[in-house]
Image: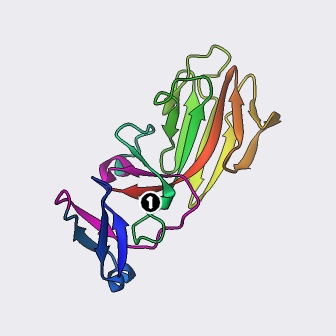
Amino acid sequence: MADAACAHCGQRVAYEASLARASATITCPGCGSDFEIGATFEPGAETILIPESQLANGAPDATGTMLLHADSVAGAAVTVKIKGFLTQEGQPPGDADFRLRSGVTIIGREKGAIRLADAAVSAQHFQVEERGTEFFLRDLESSNGTFLNGHRVRSAKLESGDRISAGGTTFTFSVRQIIPM
């Protein structure tokens, strides 16, 4: 037997371990919600639940998400997707997290998925590109440059915990495991 946390109420739901080898739908006895199980979850990364519809449209923010502690799903069989996030420093929680789109996310003052009210930021300042499970930063020929961990860069591979600065705005980059609900 194996178990998984219900995406809706958090109750642990036991199921036959053989179901973990393929995608399957199970019903939570606590709230009656159906949810899918699939690939084995890898503990250690921050994990959040996001409705599948938000993943499909690539919405850049975390609206409608629910934080889930990694220990609560460790060893459970669930479908996991890797997503990049930028957290803007100095902003209230909830207003600071931006989920990066699949493919390319442009950040700038006037154009792009993430718009900054910072006069020192160019109209299209920098982009973050998702390539599989890796993420890459590229300056878009901005006037004031893009800085990665305090060093001006034209392009670089990103790692969780990297700090990206444009004008007077600083973000922390992170990679999170997403469990679609």
In percent of the image, x 32 and y 53: which residue is there?
Answer: 52
Q: Is residue 143 left or right of residue 133?
A: right
Quadrant that contains the C terminus: bottom left
Image spot of residue 172 (x, y percent) = 65, 37
Amino acid type indicated by mark 1? Ser
Q: Is residue 25 rendered magenta in the image? A: no
User: Closest to the observer: 4 or 23?
Assistant: 4
Quadrant that contains the N terminus? bottom left
* Residue farthest along the top direction in this orientation: 119
Q: Quadrant of residue 140?
A: top right
Horizontal and vertical percent for residue 109? 57, 21
Is 37 rendered above or below residue 18? above
The residue to which callout 1 is attached is 72
Question: Bounds of the magenta span?
Answer: 30-55
| Location of residue 63 (image quadrant) | top left
Which residue is pictured at 61% across the width and 39% down the height? Answer: 127
- Please say if 13 is above or below 177: below
Identify which residue is drawn at 74% across, 47% down: 156
- Residue sitting farthest toward the right: 151
Q: Name the element at disc 1.
A: helix
Indicate the position of residue 75 as horizontal and vertical percent values. 47, 71
